[in-house]
Image (cartoon, rainbow, N blue to C red):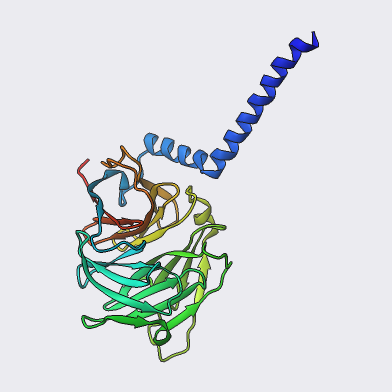
């Protein structure tokens, strides 16, 4: 009799173990929160915003010719109507056309591990050094061919230093004078930095760093790779490589809509392999780069 009882008991133990592992995996990948978000949006569509679900890929997986290094981050320059990215294997600031062609390359010296770049004003950009958590303000014009971090204004935050899981994304709110800084993970945080860049470099810095813990807890993604602030709506876009997702957040930090980077969604023929940079222009077009050198364009489509 005991021999017959052991088999059902073993099945019960294995079944319980499988359920436990599935639960842990679901929590790790934030599947419960993401599933509940999808159910709510199906039942009650979100209020007006960027509406990422309406976007479709109009250009996908196009190699950036002449670039073999890993691209990291992306920003849009509204003055020049071009994009800028950085590479960290061979540190460079690279200007791209809106269809992903290299327009010029600017050598970077002393920037450590550059992971993000953000346009903050005409000819002005902030570049992050991921490992040292430095924010470096640089200026360039049509004649700039090289930049040295030692000649630039810098701010070191040093919050929760964690090797190469540091500052991965930047976004700038020009009206609110806020610089959003994304820490990749462990923990995953979006900081708001006020006072850098300074409106008057001649005066002492008065930097204020804020963390919205309630907003960060709503991020049902595994990591943060890039950020984008939409001046029109006041909403924030957060890119996650590991979750293959772009997430729209309201002013209050509430998730509103998503753009999936997986095959079969948003018109994608293949899954975006390693999304690292996100930018948006004034028309709402979204540009995305994926390591090592792939370029994508997404545009909203009529409902």
Q: Is residue 174 visible?
A: no
Quadrant the N terminus occupies: top right
Q: Nearer the viewer, residue 51 or 162?
A: 162
The residue located at (63%, 24%) in the rendering is: 15
Q: Residue furthest top?
A: 1
Left or right: where 143 falls relative to 201: left
Figure check: 72 above or below 7? below
Residue at 31%, 37% (x, y): give it.
264
Among all residues in the image, which is located at the extreme bottom?
202
Determine if residue 12 is in view: yes
Would you say 163 lies left or right of 197 here?
right
State which quarter of the image contains the C terminus. top left
Relative image position of residue 104 (x, y in whole percent): 23, 72
**Residue at the spot x=51%, y=43% of the render?**
29
Residue pictured at 45% horizontal, 66% vertical = 181
Count of picture labels: 0
Residue 300, given in percent of the width and then of the height, sits at 23, 48
Pinpoint residue 205: horizontal percent, then vertical percent: 47, 85
Residue 50 picture location, percent across and down = 30, 52
Quadrant of residue 95 in the image?
bottom left
* Lateral position of residue 211 relative to residue 227, left or right: right
Above or below 217: residue 204: below
């Amino acid at each position: 009799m005991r021999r017959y009882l052991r088999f059902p008991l073993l099945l019960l133990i294995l079944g319980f173990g499988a359920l436990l592992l599935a639960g842990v995996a679901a929590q790790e990948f934030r599947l419960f929160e993401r599933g509940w978000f999808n159910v709510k949006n199906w039942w009650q569509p979100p209020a007006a915003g960027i509406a990422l679900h309406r976007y479709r890929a109009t250009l996908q997986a196009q190699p950036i010719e002449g670039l073999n290094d890993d691209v990291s981050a992306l920003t849009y320059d509204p003055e020049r109507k071009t994009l800028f990215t950085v590479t960290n294997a061979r540190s460079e600031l690279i200007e791209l056309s809106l269809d992903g062609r290299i327009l010029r390359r600017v050598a970077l010296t002393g920037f450590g591990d550059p992971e993000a770049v953000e346009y903050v004003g005409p000819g002005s950009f902030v570049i992050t050094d991921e490992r040292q958590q430095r924010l470096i303000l640089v200026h360039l014009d049509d004649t700039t061919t090289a930049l040295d971090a030692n000649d630039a204004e810098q701010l070191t935050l040093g919050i929760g230093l964690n090797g190469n899981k540091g500052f991965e994304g930047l976004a700038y709110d020009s009206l609110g004078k806020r610089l959003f800084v994304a820490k990749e993970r462990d923990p995953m945080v979006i900081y708001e930095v006020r006072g850098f860049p300074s409106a008057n470099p001649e005066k002492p810095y008065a930097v204020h760093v804020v963390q919205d813990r309630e907003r960060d807890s709503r991020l049902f993604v595994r990591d943060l790779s890039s950020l984008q602030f939409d001046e029109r709506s006041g909403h924030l876009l957060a890119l996650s490589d590991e979750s293959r997702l772009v997430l729209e957040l309201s002013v209050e930090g509430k998730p509103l809509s998503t753009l999936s980077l997986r095959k079969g969604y948003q018109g994608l023929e293949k899954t975006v392999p390693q999304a690292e940079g996100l930018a948006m222009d004034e028309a709402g077009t979204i540009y995305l780069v994926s390591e090592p050198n792939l370029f994508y364009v997404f545009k909203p489509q009529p409902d």
